[in-house]
Amino acid sequence: MSALSNLKILDFSTLLPGPYATMVMTDLGADVIHIESPSRPDLTRVAGPFKDGVATAHSMLNRNKRSISLDLKHPEAVEIVKSLIAKHDFDILVEQFRPGVMEKLGLHYGCLKKLNERLIYCSLTGYGQTGPFSDRAGHDI
């Protein structure tokens, strides 16, 4: 049995910080489902280098993860996420949107905690949830 084999994680992150963190968790045995947008692909999916037509960075960062495509701007997709949280006993949610996005979607901590009181909710941002730069994107070269 691996160190994290009893954890289930719902991963809404893109690019590098979140996918790297959840990749490490899969390496330690966690079950991770990566939620992807059908209309806005993760930039690691379209950036080279490529091996056999597949972006190597995306393959590495998302190894051992399952994924589903959901358009979170549609209420049906939001209900699917709520159902996953409530019925499938996810332990951790990782999101990497700008502050306020998950609240606008109805997927903020307070809402999801009511569905699963054990849920650990991890929000990754470049400049924190509050403050003068909180609304800025936080990726750097």
Image (cartoon, rainbow, N blue to C red):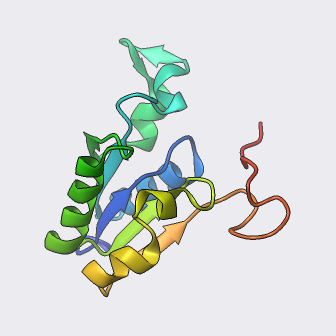
- 118 to 6, vertically: above or below: below
Q: Residue at x 31, y 75 (%)?
A: 91
- 40 to 112, vertically: above or below: above
- 92 to 33, vertically: above or below: below
Report the front residue among 22 and 110: 110
Q: How many marks?
A: 0
Q: Residue at x 45, y 42 (%)?
A: 61
Residue 55: image location, x then y, percent: 45, 23
Residue 63, located in which quarter of the rendered image?
Answer: top left
Image quarter of the N terminus = bottom left
Residue 47 can be seen, yes or no: yes
> Going by the image, does 79 lie left or right of 110?
left
Q: Residue at x 56, y 53 (%)?
A: 97
Residue 111: image location, x then y, percent: 37, 76
- 43 to 64, vertically: above or below: above
Residue 108, located in which quarter of the rendered image?
Answer: bottom left
Residue 138: image location, x then y, percent: 73, 49
Q: Residue furthest top?
A: 52
Residue 116 can be seen, yes or no: no
Q: Residue furthest left?
A: 87
Residue 27: image location, x then y, percent: 36, 57
Q: Residue at x 34, y 31 (%)?
A: 38
Q: Residue furthest bottom?
A: 117
Image quarter of the C terminus = top right
